[in-house]
Amino acid sequence: MADPRGFITTPREVAERRPVEERVKDWNEVYPGGPGRALLPIISEQAGRCMDCGIPFCHSGCPLGNLIPEWNDLVWRKDWDEALDRLHATNNFPEFTGRLCPAPCETACVVGINRDAVTIKNVEVAIIDKAWEDRQVRPEPPEWLTGKTVAVVGSGPAGLAAAQQLTRAGHTVAVYERDDKAGGLLRYGIPEFKMEKIQVDRRINQMEREGTVFRTGVQVGETLTGHHLRDRYDAVVLAIGATVRRDLPVPGRELTGIHQAMEFLPQANRVALGEEVEDQILATDKDVIIIGGGDTGADCLGTSIRQGARSITQLEILPNPGTDRPETQPWPTYPMIYRVSSAHEEAGERVYSISTKEFLGQDGHVSALRLVEVQMVDGKFEEVEGSEKDLPAQLVLFAMGFTGPEREGLVDQLGVDLDERGNVKRDKRYMSSVDGVFVAGDAGRGQSLIVWAIAEGRSAAAGVDEYLSGSTNLPAPIPPHARPLTV
Ligand SMILES: Cc1cc2nc3c(=O)[nH]c(=O)nc-3n(C[C@H](O)[C@H](O)[C@H](O)COP(=O)(O)OP(=O)(O)OC[C@H]3O[C@@H](n4cnc5c(N)ncnc54)[C@H](O)[C@@H]3O)c2cc1C
Ligand code: SF4
């Protein structure tokens, strides 16, 4: 056990972010020198707050099965090498989750019942950032090769986790990615200020040194078809994400200046890293309205601030959930509460219980949104009479989520069955309806989180290894039907 009285004597503490006025002038992470370095002076004491529960409920919040009390104890003792070993035992990429995860482990932490939960995510990121800084993260190539080949399509967290597990198990793995660089949403969705891309680059470098081959700029389903891939490789893993974007087909949708978040964010990410983008969608000097109150919306908000938007408003159709855990979502579930991301600290206004009726335009370009307040009646949104108002906007960004994987091209070619939600159906080993074709991440689960994508990638790798070798020693942290701890 860490400090036996830590949870009583030590209050929860987190690292200071850089001052808002400083950080909105650049694209770097919001913590000085990155979260790991910023946390180092306080993190051992914070890890000491862990009670090493007989039944560690934090485990039930995390699909990876992270060994949380073990690494809390090791960090409290400052045994960083062993902590890294225990961290990597369940998570290929703790620097991604340590920065980006909403931390369902913390809302399930037992200390959180009547005090502030242990800062689990901060302990995680402190261990891995220190390890990278101390050059302790090294390639782990396999000792021998099995002679079996695997193609992984898609290089987001699910594809990367599956590829790393399978390469280390001795299979020869090629990752196909249609973008020019690997990383999926980690690279072109998530902005620099949340995670600098050096984090992705050095993992890709580690994987290449372990033997994984990356073939970027290849849209599988075009010249290279799904059938080619199935013929050429002993197994295929579809980790193509859920990239079909939800739209808002109300009057005025055809006006210019209305874009999907995933048109806006990738361009901004490229420019932040020094690339040139023609006709970039820019928030500069504009009134920006973001439709959608989630993570993607917050990323658009932080990006718009850095581009010099005049005003930013984020709209959410659901009511403001408030800051307290609702009685209907008790510990240890992940509650819907009002959360303040780093971008929300910086600027912008959030408006709840509001719906867009129409986009108004001038000379073919959007100039305002006609909005109406809504309330929930018998599970349906109803407009509040007389609440219509117009809000000026010269840039509108849709951050309303995704409806599933793209069907045309690869998915159609392979003829894999889809489930009732349009995701690729899989059996308990993550195999689709087509022999030897597996599926991992958002493509099978639907839009989710990085931690779930990594857990799926690891689990699908175990399914593939068993399929190719007859048995497997690879861990499978979750079955395909596992769901987050909610009510
Ligand atoms: C803007 C944004 C911000 C987010 N922020 C967070 C966050 O802070 N925390 C969090 O936990 N989750 C976040 N999420 C969700 C998270 O990023 C996803 O759940 C996760 O990335 C899913 O991983 P994946 O590997 O299944 O798919 P993806 O990351 O979507 O990767 C799929 C990859 O497949 C490639 N691909 C698709 N079809 C083909 C093809 N035919 N040929 C070749 N390549 C193909 C795509 O180009 C893409 O690179 C965010 C999502 C978005 C959109
Ligand atoms: S639930 Fe909280 S206190 Fe208990 S073991 Fe997990 S992190 Fe430690």
Image (spheres, helix red, strand yellow):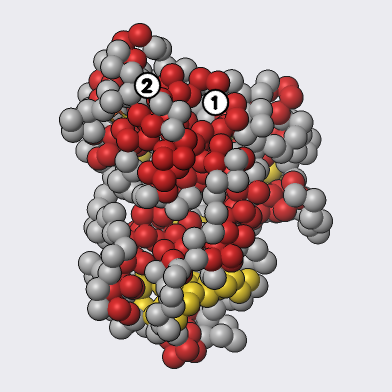
Q: Which residue is tagged 1?
A: 39
For image coordinates 30% across by 59% down, the residue present is 475
Q: Which amino acid does label 1 sit on?
A: Leu
For image coordinates 30% across by 13% down, the residue present is 5
The answer as to whether callout 1 falls within 8 Å of ligand 2 is no
- Badge 1, how many Cα within 10 Å: few under 14, some, many 20+? many
Q: Is mark 1 on a helix, strand or loop?
A: helix
Q: What element carries label 2?
A: loop
* Mark 2 or mark 1, whichever is nearer to me: 2
Up-down relation of residue 123 to residue 291 (above or below): above
Tag 2 and tag 1, C-beta contact below 8 Å: no
Looking at this rendering, what residue extends furthest in the top direction? 9
Could you tell me residue 71's position as x and y percent?
37, 35
Can the viewer see residue 428? yes
Left or right of 288 on screen, residue 242 = left
Can the viewer see residue 405? no
For image coordinates 22% across by 28% down, the residue present is 53
Q: Which residue is tagged 2?
A: 48
Task: Determine the image quadrant of residue 37.
Answer: top right
Q: Which of 303 and 254 is in front in this view?
A: 303
The answer as to whether callout 2 falls within 8 Å of ligand 2 is no
Up-down relation of residue 312 to residue 459 (above or below): above
Looking at this rendering, what residue extends furthest in the left direction? 54
